Image (cartoon, rainbow, N blue to C red):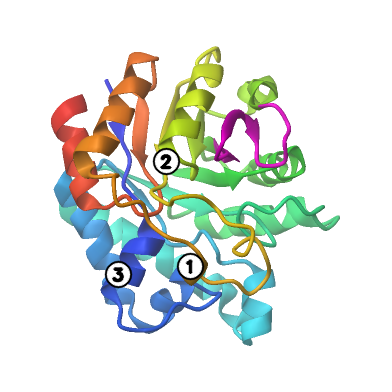
Amino acid sequence: MITILDGGMGQELIARTSAEPTPLWATKVLLDEPELVRSVHDDFFAAGAVVATTNSYAIHHDRLIPAGLDDKFESLHRAACEIACASRDAAGGGRVAGAIGPLIGSYRTDPLPEDAAESFAEICRIQAPLVDLFLIETVSTFDQLHATLAGAKGHGRPVWLGVSVNDYDGTKLRSGEPVEDVMDWADDVEAILVNCATPEAVTMAVDVIKGTNKPFGAYANGFTEITQSFVRMGATVKELSARADLTPEAYAEFAEGWAKMGATIIGGCCEVGPAHIAELVRRLT
């Protein structure tokens, strides 16, 4: 049986708001237009997803402090979780995954601060009473992996680990470290996933992680590539471009390949919308 995740929250919100993208990305929409967040969750459930990923990926102190919004840290996490839970309940079932994105920024390989594990633990303490599981996303280095897993321990919720790989060599994390070594940490998680890289790279990574003894899966993005101009502080999604060829049918063909390799958790990341998820449901369930 294949568990169908939702698709990419951030890009769906960008598509639905008239506001210009900011470095806060989807967090800004959560602040100003929370009804849009609810509508995205509702549409993914209507498409057949059974897991809603909270819009909390980028709610970190290091993002909020420069914007003068750090006093809203806890309330934003709670709001993201509560909106996802309300959508799940309205849909009549499913699971809510508390999204935990990387510190500093996506796809970056910078050394983390010494208190990184506690930063993740703080998020988990807030989310744990509300979510069904923690979804650690877009882990690009083993430094990030160690810190997030340490922070997620002891909160009474299962942990799904999502790693992001090089867009041109899916056998390596974005740091260049081998994906194969991620499996050494299988005992600390309920599932291992590959997320937010090109479908081609994700396919290469799934071929590696299929050797794990845990459930595994994938959710790729629909960007042409992650550009160097985006991997810097203060960048916005204007630095990235979407692929024109990744239709719901094309994306589902990649997903069918992952399923044939044994993947049992499949969804979508950035630029993968409700229509893509509906096609996954049609083909895989």
Give the quadrant of residue 55.
Answer: bottom left
Q: In this picture, is 283 found above or below 164?
A: above
Write the residue at 60% across / 56% down. Answer: 106
Instruction: Give coordinates of residue 79: x percent, y percent.
Output: 42, 70
Q: Identify the image quadrant of the C terminus.
A: top left
Q: Which residues are magenta?
A: 162-178
The residue indicated by pointer 3 is: 15
The residue indicated by pointer 1 is: 237
Decide which of tag 1 and tag 3 comes sooner along the chain. Answer: 3
Count of labels shown?
A: 3
Write the residue at 40% across / 53% down. Answer: 270
The type of residue carrying mark 1 is Val
The type of residue carrying mark 2 is Ala
Write the residue at 30% across / 83% down. Answer: 18
Give the side of residue 5 with respect to residue 194, left or right.
left
Closer to the camera in the image, 73 or 25: 25
Q: In this picture, is 187 found above or below 250?
A: above
